[in-house]
Image: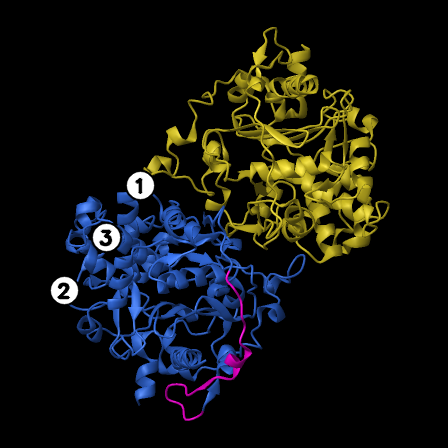
Chain colours: A blue, B yellow
């Protein structure tokens, strides 16, 4: 019973989804499936953004590595000088580290978990060295992958940075910075409430409900030309102004993407910079990243701050390692220690326990990071279909994973992921 | 009279266009115009690919530097190791080099010609050193710009490379490699005829004629969803199969973009690689380029080989300098000497003089390069709105320019460009 409860948190996964049969990782290998391969590709292997299946499993296994081929995007330039290169000291014994998946009676090796989780790429950094690195499916070492909601963590970290620098006052209201938000639910929400997603919004992300607000949000942000009879909001910012309030802010953690896009708007308004430009300038370039990242944009050229970032795996490992190192990386203090401490300390566990994510016992949410409050003080960035940046300070470990799991909600892969991360951390600590 | 004749070659420019008044370079500065600036941009400053004006002057001045923000694209990865950096020894006296524009009685300085030509960026390399480098409008040193028909030269150079390597036989027919082209005009055209554009095609690129085949080509290649009632070809390759023959191949040079896309198909079929991948592997990475380039793609993910390349200005200067150096650059022989000699020697001047470009006296066309056959043996890659890679072997000079001239046809900027290039070359030779 606990297992089922765990698996259906967030409402993203249902009993029917769980009992559904999916192609295995091997069967759904995008190279074997032949998506967009050939000159021209066979008609039934051509994908497009206008084609509903392009971002659904199994086509997702190709598309997650090729978003630019389908959509308008804006580049996040990588470092032009001072490139960083991780020292590498691979430890193949990690493959054999075994763990017990949540709700299971049988052990599984870490290696087995990779296919189970439809992993596209995984890197483990221990004490600053890459000890594990694998690529599958359509991802290569020089490729990029959709970070999905891990994008939120980048926006939240930038927001936290501006708070630490005094550019944003966390006690001020969103409408103090963006007057256009005045009559929306964000109007009387504080920057802190938005950063920690304790706003009370009339906004459903239930994709199974055709009347859920997420569909209006998606239509507004779709960069393809709007249908002739379309009369809704034309872009993300227009949509944000329509979000209604439902309850009192500051009480309950409610994980809703639009908070991040509202934050993105606030950040751009106060800095005069787009999220891609600010991310590049303040984080991506200083890290010494090797590959340009990019954001999907809406029809007004506004980056999808809540889910549109795409980047290289080694590059995002640099980000995780910088966070683990209290903001110091590539010979410089990229983020202030004060911000990293604020993330590590976490948000309100009480607000979190009142949320639909209460199965994640003891967790909290802060600056758009998920804080486990486990005995290692681990915290993580999470995106649908299995995207992960997992920082374990006690084990001096950072694990980054890109994946294309058939089920969007992480509840489907958490049982084979969270205990595995923790076991590898424990293994590395004993070395 | 000669002046008018010169200006209206190619049928792209007409008397009415010439007498039209355009905003000056300064007045049309995209930063000042504010395209896509602000959070959100003002409604009348939002551009989109579905908006007819996005690629028309003056919006073009922004869009040419931001194609990815509007369209699906595929990356041409830059060098991962062995990056190249030009030595720089700027010579400000080049600004004052003066020349007489074709058809004019008044001298103009090189510096004055930059605004006259709506230059977005220009680099002059002399004896391997950058001696001149300027950026205007929306272009920066780390930015990219649409190469437009300079893209053809990349495809043609790759085609010539495959001929030199024996992978393609220039005397074989297109249909020997791509049987799907059998019943089209390309079916009985040789690889050489396609490389030199002496095919006889029923294909008009007259944008003023609503029945011109170029509109069907454009609709086929448009990556946006097709209208519901659309029944034409779905992508570039489907369109190419419909091109009819009109006359005998091999007689007359006829500059038509579809030749390049047919060549792109042939190249991809024989190599098993897309044009972006092949260009990256054989040229872009070996050059030691610093910035990823990219191609616009159609709805099947096929790169627009005839006009869809976008890249950085310093990077394309590396390409020009490699060609000038007989294929040797960044410590390696990137292209065989035999190919460069073949380009330099040029194509049939007789076939060229029978073309609509006969005002370009003595010129020829070879491997999708324009050969001037002037006393310096200069040859050039050309794209609409002023895109240029100009190689002057005798002066040991390479000039690359990105521009966003209001008039597409180079006839509008040639009078202020070709004599200017030649005068700068002469100046550099006398130093």
Q: Position of residue A412 (x, y in %)?
A: 40, 78
Q: Are marks 3 and 1 on the same chain?
A: yes
Q: Callout 2: few (<14), some (14-19), or many (20+) C-alpha neighbours within 10 Å?
A: few
Tag 2, which secondary structure?
loop
Q: Callout 3: few (<14), some (14-19), or many (20+) C-alpha neighbours within 10 Å?
A: some
Chain ID for label 3? A
Chain ID for label 2? A
In the rendered image, which quarter contains the N terminus of chain B? top right
Q: Mark 3 — residue? A: A163
Query: What residue span does the magenta drawing correspond to?
Result: A86-106
Q: Position of residue B119 (x, y in %)?
A: 53, 26
Residue A171 lies left or right of residue A343; in this view the side is left
Tag 3, which secondary structure?
helix
How far is disc 3 from disc 2 in space, using C-alphas?
26 Å
How far is disc 3 from disc 1 in space, using C-alphas?
16 Å
Compare residues A305 and B328 and report the one nearer the observer. Answer: B328
Q: Mark 1 — residue? A: A272
Q: Is residue A105 on the magenta stretch?
A: yes
Q: Report the predominant secondary structure element of the magenta stretch.
A: loop
Q: Is residue A83 on the magenta stretch?
A: no
Residue B244 lies left or right of residue A150; in this view the side is right
Which label was assigned to residue A247?
Answer: 2
Mark in front: 3 vs 2: 3
């Amino acid at each position: 019973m606990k297992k089922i409860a765990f698996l259906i948190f967030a409402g993203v996964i249902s009993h029917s989804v769980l009992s559904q049969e999916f192609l295995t990782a091997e069967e759904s290998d995008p190279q074997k499936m032949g998506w967009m391969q050939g000159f021209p590709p066979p008609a039934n292997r051509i994908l497009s953004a206008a084609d509903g299946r392009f971002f659904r499993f199994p086509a997702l296994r190709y598309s997650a590595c090729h978003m630019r081929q389908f959509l308008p995007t804006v580049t996040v330039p990588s470092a032009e000088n001072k490139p960083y290169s991780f020292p590498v000291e691979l430890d193949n014994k990690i493959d054999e580290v075994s763990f017990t998946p949540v709700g299971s009676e049988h052990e599984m090796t870490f290696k087995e978990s990779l296919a189970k989780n439809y992993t596209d790429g995984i890197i483990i950094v221990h004490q600053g060295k890459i000890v594990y690195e694998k690529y599958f499916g359509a991802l290569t070492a020089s490729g990029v992958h959709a970070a999905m909601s891990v994008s939120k963590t980048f926006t939240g970290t930038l927001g936290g940075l501006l708070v630490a620098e005094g550019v944003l006052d966390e006690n001020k209201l969103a409408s103090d910075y963006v007057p256009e938000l005045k009559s929306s639910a964000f109007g009387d929400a504080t920057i802190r409430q938005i950063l920690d997603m304790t706003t009370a919004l009339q906004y459903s992300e239930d994709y199974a409900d055709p009347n859920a607000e997420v569909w209006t949000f998606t239509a507004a942000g779709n960069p393809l030309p709007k249908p002739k009879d379309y009369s809704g909001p034309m872009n993300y910012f227009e949509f944000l102004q329509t979000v209604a309030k439902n309850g009192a802010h500051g009480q309950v953690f409610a994980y809703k993407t639009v908070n991040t896009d509202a934050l993105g708007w606030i950040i751009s308004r106060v800095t005069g910079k787009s999220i891609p430009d600010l991310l590049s300038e303040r984080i991506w370039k200083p890290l010494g990243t090797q590959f340009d990242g990019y954001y999907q944009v809406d029809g007004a050229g506004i980056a999808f701050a809540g889910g549109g970032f795409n980047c290289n795996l080694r590059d995002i490992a640099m980000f995780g390692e910088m966070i683990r190192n209290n903001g110091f990386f590539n010979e410089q203090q990229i983020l202030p220690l004060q911000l990293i401490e604020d993330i590590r300390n976490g948000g309100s566990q009480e607000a979190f326990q009142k949320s639909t994510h209460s199965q994640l016992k003891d967790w909290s949410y802060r600056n758009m990071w998920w804080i486990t409050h486990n005995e290692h003080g681990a915290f993580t960035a999470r995106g649908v279909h299995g995207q992960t940046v997992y920082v374990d300070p006690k084990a001096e470990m950072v694990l980054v994973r890109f994946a294309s799991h058939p089920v969007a909600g992480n509840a489907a892969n958490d049982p084979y992921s969270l205990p595995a991360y923790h076991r590898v951390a424990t293994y590395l600590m004993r070395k």
